[in-house]
Image (tube, rainbow, N blue to C red):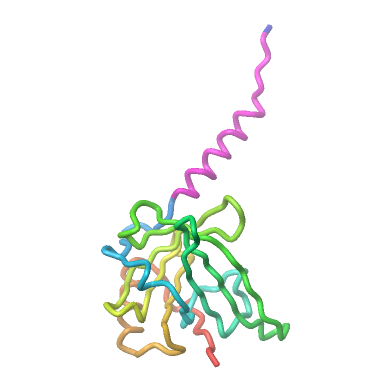
Amino acid sequence: MKTRNVVGLPMLGLVTLVLLNSCKTIPKNAVAVKPFDIKKYLGKWYEIARFDFRFERNLNNTTADYSLNKDGSIKVVNRGYNYKTGKWKEATGKAKFVSSPNEAKLKVSFFGPFYSGYNVIELDDNYTYALIAGKNLDYLWLLSREKTMPENIKQRFLQKATALGYDVKKLIWVKQE
């Protein structure tokens, strides 16, 4: 009688599920900015607001700095001040375009081969203010080249996020000093 490895089937299913879920890079009905010019987007951005998640918990003065790597990927350096420990925290990662460099639909990784969605879904013409969606409705950021954001831009971004299903009441408004 032939025996089968039935333990391997659930594991294969789990691996497949994880891989398929990691391919999901943008929330339903969200659309990445197109056309997109990465060269205009590079540089320092201040985080104005975000949803709370463990990697940025208790951080203020948070920034993201983007630069090009030699291989065409984007170096991402996130930095923030942990007001509870009194220490700066920094993480360096890599972002890649999901399809075309002309579309602001990217995937970013801070942990080896594991990527998550990073999607610029709203951007002003001067690349001064950006609304970023993660892979699902649990991740949202409002970014600015300055430490503040005009109220009209903020309201426009909040309206768009709400229309996509985000609960903007959960946003943490970051102190930038």
Q: Kindly identify the residue that appears in the image at 70 percent across and 82 percent down.
A: 87
**19 is within the stretch colored magenta:** yes
Q: Nearer the viewer, residue 147 or 1?
A: 147
Query: Given the current orientation, which residue lies at the most extreme bottom position?
Result: 177
Query: Given the current orientation, which residue lies at the most extreme top position?
Result: 1
Give the vertical position of 102 relative to 9 (above or below).
below
Q: Position of residue 112 (x, y in %)?
A: 61, 53
Query: Given the current orientation, which residue lies at the most extreme front position?
Result: 70
Q: Position of residue 160 (x, y in %)?
A: 31, 73
Image quadrant containing the N terminus: top right
Q: Kindly identify the residue that appears in the image at 43 percent across and 90 percent down.
A: 148
Q: Which of the 4 quarters of the picture holds residue 97?
A: bottom left
Q: Is residue 75 left or right of residue 126?
A: right
Q: Kindly identify the residue that appears in the image at 55 percent across and 58 percent down.
A: 109
Q: Nearer the viewer, residue 50 or 126?
A: 126
Q: Position of residue 89 (x, y in %)?
A: 66, 76
Q: Which residues are magenta?
A: 2-23
Give the vertical position of 150 relative to 57 (above or below).
below
